[in-house]
Image (cartoon, helix red, strand yellow):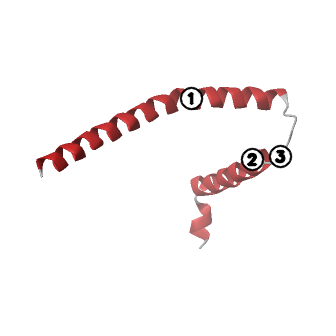
């Protein structure tokens, strides 16, 4: 068991996960007034999320449309 705790990377990973969970739980509190750094981070993350989500939704819609067309083709063939 001592070898388990001697691995520094594992300990750092566990501490990082604990800190991440603590930060997430703190940020999920219902607060009406956010500080300036929190608003800046929220805006930057929201913009980044929008940049990645728009193409992902577009690709998902295209794949769904192609799947629908292929299903229609198979139904018409039968």
Viewer-side residue, 22 vs 75: 75
- Which residue is located at x 72 percent, y 50 percent? 19
Out of 52 and 59, give the one closest to the viewer.
Answer: 59
Left or right: 25 as drawn, with respect to 68? right
Q: Where is residue 2 in the image (x, y as percent from the top left)?
A: 61, 70
Pinpoint residue 6: horizontal percent, then vertical percent: 61, 62
Looking at the image, which residue is at 64% across and 30% down? Answer: 46
Which circle, 2 or 3, is nearer the viewer? 3
Looking at the rendered structure, the secondary structure element under dot 3 is loop
Could you give the CA–CA distance between mark 2 and mark 1, rounded to whole angstroms?
22 Å
User: Looking at the picture, does residue 18 appear above or below residue 32?
Assistant: below
Crowdedness of circle 2 by 10 Å Cα count: few (<14), some, many (20+)?
Answer: few
In the image, farthest residue toward the left: 77
User: In the rendered structure, are the residues bearing label 2 and label 3 in contact, judged by CB atoms less than 8 Å apart?
Assistant: no
Mark nearer the N terminus (2 vs 1): 2
Using a 10 Å C-alpha cutoff, classify the residue at mark 1 as few (fewer than 14 neighbours), some (14 to 19) or many (20 or more). Answer: few
- The residue shown at (28%, 38%) is 66
**Residue 36: percent from left, percent from top:** 83, 26
In the rendered view, does 56 fall on the left or right side of 72?
right
Check disc 2 and report the residue beneath it.
23
Marks 1 and 3 in Cβ contact (< 8 Å): no
User: Which sits in the foreground, 7 or 65?
Assistant: 65
> Alpha-carbon neighbours of circle 3 within 10 Å: few (<14), some, or many (≥20)?
few
Q: Which residue is drawn at 39% across and 36% down?
A: 61
Report how far apart the C-alphas of labels 1 and 3 lie in the structure.
23 Å
- Which residue does the numbered mark 1 point to in the structure image? 50
Q: Is residue 17 above or below residue 43?
A: below
Looking at the image, is mark 2 or mark 3 earlier in the sequence?
2
Q: Which residue is under mark 3?
A: 30
Of labels 2 and 1, the one closer to you: 1
Verify CB contact (< 8 Å) between mark 2 and mark 1: no
């Amino acid at each position: 068991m001592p070898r388990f705790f001697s691995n520094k990377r594992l300990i750092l990973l566990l501490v990082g996960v604990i800190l991440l969970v603590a930060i997430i739980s703190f940020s999920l509190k219902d607060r009406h007034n956010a500080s300036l750094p929190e608003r800046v981070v929220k805006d930057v993350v929201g913009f980044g999320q929008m940049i990645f989500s728009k193409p992902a939704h577009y690709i998902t819609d295209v794949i769904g449309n192609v799947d629908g067309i292929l299903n229609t083709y198979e139904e018409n063939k039968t």
